[in-house]
Amino acid sequence: MSSTSEATAKTWQQTKSERTRTAILNAAIDCFYKRGYFNTTTDHIAQQAAVSRGAMLHHFRTRACVIRAAVEHLNQLRLDMFTEEESRIQEGAEHTRVEEGIDAYWRQLNTREFVVFHELKVAARTDKELASVLTPALKAYDLAWAEATSQLFPDLAQSEAFTRTVYMTRYLLEGMAVSRMVNGMKVPENMLMDWLKADLRRSYQDVRTVKRPR
């Protein structure tokens, strides 16, 4: 076999291996979503990914290995989703960014990725091994959130009022999503979203008024 053929075969094998690995990680997330973190086994993941036990062990020797990789994969999916949404918002007019930002994050909170990540956060309270990989993932997401909001409103980012309203927005929306997810609790979403948007517009206007030179 020529060196070119060998290189092509190697590239194909690498691509196949990467696809199998990604399929396993996506299957792990699916299993966490359908079965729950503690009820998911490596056999469940292998079956969901439609791979053999041997292929599973080739990529991940233990459950701890696949859990660690799945958490990192899940966090990257969330970061990619967040980045894509925020880039769209930045293209819009400034006066619409508050509303668009709230709507965009609400959409992200109503995905399987958020459901799984929330369950992992709860599980990590008593699972030190899970916490060791989840903690840096949370920090990476928090950093991305802070950077994105600063880019959306660069002239307001250093304001204490801006920081306060950003956190209020995030945790109100996440709390609403968790209430819906855990027990199907009916929350007055439209009323709360309208109030939040109006309050943020007012807060940002107040900040601009204070920052405006006299």
Image (cartoon, grey):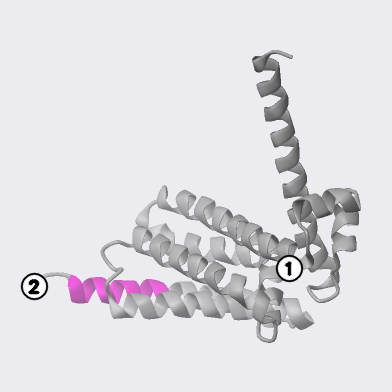
C-alpha span from label 2 to label 1: 60 Å
Front-most of residues 195 and 121: 121
Image position of 31 with respect to 172: above or below: above
Front-most of residues 136 and 188: 136
**Kind of element beneath mark 1:** helix
* Residue range of the region highlighted in magenta in the rendering: 199-211
Q: Is residue 191 visible?
A: no
Residue 214, numbered circle: 2
Residue lying at 59% horizontally and 76% vertically, measured from the top left = 174
**At which x and y percent is residue 207?**
27, 75
**At which x and y percent is residue 93?**
38, 52
Front-most of residues 37 and 199: 37
Q: For the view shown, which residue lies furthest in the top direction?
A: 2
* Residue type at numbered disc 2: Arg
* Residue type at numbered disc 1: Ala
Identify the residue under disc 1: 64
**Kind of element beneath mark 2:** loop
Between marks 2 and 1 in the image, the one whose residue lies nearer the viewer = 1
10 Å crowding of disc 2: few (<14), some (14-19), many (20+): few
